Image: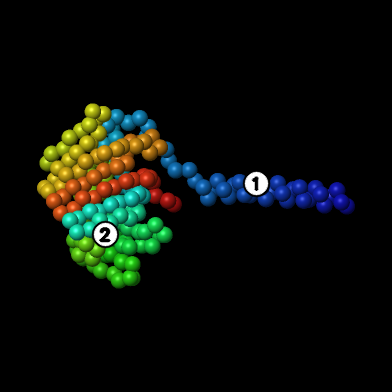
Amino acid sequence: MRSNLTLQASKLIVFTITAFILSGCSLFKSRPDLPQNLSPDDRLRYLQERDYWSLTGRIGITTKDESNSASFSWEKNKDSMVLRIYGSLGVTYARLESKPGFATIELSDDEVYQDSDAERLLWQTTGWYIPVNLMQHWILGIPEKAPSFEMNNDGYLAKLNYGYWEVNYQKYQDFRGLLMPKKLRADHPDVTIKFSIHDWEFTPDE
């Protein structure tokens, strides 16, 4: 009788381990591999074709009157985007969501505001002037609509100028095989914005 119980217990253990492994395979799906060793031109085309990207990092904003810094996450999915600015304990200062012609922002006091322009809405409610519409391209290292720009010796964007904005790409880093901006600085006569990016993703969680 004891040997039968031992056999049954062994079978149960094997079944449990197998079920755990199989469930783990479904829970922890690996993300599709990013293309490796792309030339600067191929990298640019790859990024221009992306429907989705997301990043996390730190942002610092300095004006003539004050200086602030915070963590941030930014997600772009087709024509919509979500920009979240939050503190060291994860407390959200502002969550900006926009679609073509419509934007909403939720602040830390749970107040919600709306506008047809995300950039203007962010400025009016927080005092942070971030060119979010164009920065969606610039932060990737794409000189979207920039009338003048410079490339570095390796063929990647080094600087761009657009109106009163000058954006300098201070550092690139390999993120799982794809070279992406790590640090960049955007200067305007009224504000300086510094971005330090911790991670990039190009496939949404499913």
Relative to 7, is 44 on the left or the right? Answer: left
Viewer-side label of 2, 1: 2
Q: Position of residue 29 (x, y in %)?
A: 49, 46
The picture places residue 1, in percent across and down from the top left corner, at: 88, 52
**Residue drawn at 25 percent across, 34 percent down:** 156
The amino acid on which the numbered mark 1 sits, given as a three-letter code, is Thr
Taking the view exactly as shown, the residue that stands out farthest to the top is 153
- Residue on which disc 1 sits: 18
Residue 150, by quadrant, is top left
Does label 2 or label 1 sit earlier along the sequence? 1
Label disc, if present, on residue 131 of the rendered structure? none
Above/below status of 166 relative to 64: above
**Viewer-side residue, 3 vs 130:** 130
- SS label for mark 1: helix
Question: Rounded to the nearest whole Å, what is the CA distance between mark 2 and mark 1?
Answer: 45 Å
Badge 2 amino acid: Ser
Q: Are the residues flagged by discs 2 and 1 in contact, CB closer than 8 Å?
A: no
Q: Residue at x 29, y 29 (%)?
A: 39
Q: Is residue 106 above or below residue 198?
A: below
Tell me the SS state at disc 2: strand
Residue 185: x and y, percent?
24, 45
Q: Quadrant of residue 37 in the image?
A: top left
Q: Dot 2 corresponds to which residue? A: 98
